[in-house]
Image: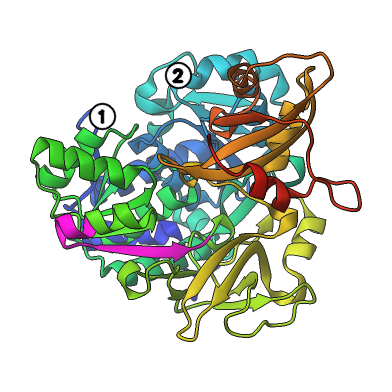
Amino acid sequence: MGLHDITFYDIINRNALAFRNSQAWYEVDDGRSMTFGEFKVKVDRLAGGLYNLGVRYGDRIGLLGKNSLEFFLLYGAAAAIGAIVLPINWRLSADEVCFNLNDCDPAILFADAEYQALISENKAKLHGVREIFNLKADRGQFRAMSELMQNEPIDSRITAAVGSHDGFIIIHTAAVAGRPRGALLSHGNVLCSNMHLMKLFGATAQDVNLGLLPLFHIAGLVMVTCIFHAGGTNLSMGKFDADTAVELIETRRASLIFDFAPILGAIVEAAQKSGRKISHLRCVLGLDTPETIEKYQKATGGTFFSMYGQTETSCIATHGPYSDRPGAAGRTIELADVRLVDDDDQTVRTGEVGEITVKGPMVFKGYWNLPEDNAYTFRGGWHHTGDMGRFDEDGFLFYEGRKAEKELIKPGGENVYPAEVEKVILEHPAIEKTVVIGVPDPKWKEGIKAVCILKPGQDLTPQDLIDFVGERIARYKKPGYVEFVNDLPLLKDGSPDRAEVKKRYGGTE
């Protein structure tokens, strides 16, 4: 808090001076545009309105909505006060939304019109929320966000009290052990990630980020903050559409995107069908299949950057050009140390598989109100990711899956823990036992498969079970594949032998 500190709000101030008249934001859905100078004015007035409403340092501000200018303005206003943004995944079920909100107890909530019925129907369950506002364009049944803009700018004495180690964002991770955990990231975490990505891309004020991923996701957030930090332009899409994305790459010279399958493949295919050029797309960062990566690089001459990271490492821990070592996740970023360890936390030898542990200024502050989880995760002074990997002789990291205790499925960049899906499946009266596994999927790269035993005398179709799960948790967590079997292999302790289940039933036929 002072001389040696810098926050995201300080970047807003810096850019309002350095790039005052340059375009900071373009809203694809409605054509609204904002310069860096205008952005600061809006942020200061919004921060003043929030402060007058009683929002203070450390308070949480809930956001439930699609990407929009208002969404990002609230990040800036929270940064000015020292409040913490709690973005909610709008793909979640009503019960999951309520859990995440109550877990972090925001006093203020902003919601898009399409999610306001959900909020109204469950308002009695939200024990800490005292004020609810419309989010985008003041549409909806709650108080208008524009009310908060009719205020004097935030007092500089308030903004000066916020430091780089203070909390900035809480993003809930997938439900390990049956419940999501809110990962608290600081201003310093986000700015560290920005600097690494700016260096990786060679990003400048001439770059344009095509914001395809939601701002509740760490990858979507850091891409937007990275290009904002560099003085470039963010094109904001509320919903991904491949044809629109191709048009924006060609006409607005979009140069950067973050990719999870099937985004890049859809863009390349749409460009080929339309005849439009996507050669401006010089950098893509993310996860995809070798076939799609090679098609993109051949079509554009651009560079695909592979990476390893998670919310808890502010998105990245390793990265590098895909072509440097196809199949690898790059090398350790500049301001980090990555070590692979065995079950006794001893460093494994080069070429051996071990748990990926990380330390450095990109490591998150901890899980919200979960001291025991934090003690376990941060044991020995390292963040234990739960992911497995191996280093080759040249220091390239190869991802080797999750530890058994934290088995994870990643359909289209989302994180899904089998235990959460299994819990819902077992609520069905026809199911005796189940094991949920990840399987290859042509669209999402990895799909979700439920291997189930029916109770005696019961009958059930795969689609009936898929629909049952989709009605109870976020639809991206429901199985895409179901197979009914007569028995499941077990370990000596009676628990399912997941490795053997995957070996026997890991196909999608």
- Residue for point 73% across, 34% down: 422
- Residue for point 65% across, 19% down: 468
Most foreground residue, 13 or 464: 464
371 falls in the magenta region = no
- Report which residue position mark 1 lands on: 29
Q: What kind of element bears circle 2?
A: helix
Q: Is residue 257 visible?
A: yes
Magenta region: which residues?
Answer: 296-309
- Report which residue position mark 2 lands on: 114
* Disc 1 crowd, CA 10 A, few/some/many (<14, 14-19, 20+): few
Residue 252 lies left or right of residue 485; in this view the side is left
First-in-chain label (2 vs 1): 1
Q: Position of residue 478 (x, y in %)?
A: 59, 30
Task: Reply above or below: 153 against 492.
Answer: above
Label drawn at residue 131: none
Colour basis = rainbow
Q: Position of residue 351 (x, y in %)?
A: 57, 80
Q: In 3D space, how far apart are the residues under numbered discs 2 and 1 (Cα atoms)?
A: 15 Å
Q: Is residue 2 visible?
A: no
Amino acid carrying label 2: it is: Glu
Residue 38 lies left or right of residue 452; in this view the side is left
Q: Position of residue 102 (x, y in %)?
A: 70, 33
Task: Reply above or below: 476 against 385.
Answer: above
Furthest residue toward right: 493
Most foreground residue, 395 or 64: 395
Amino acid carrying label 1: it is: Asp
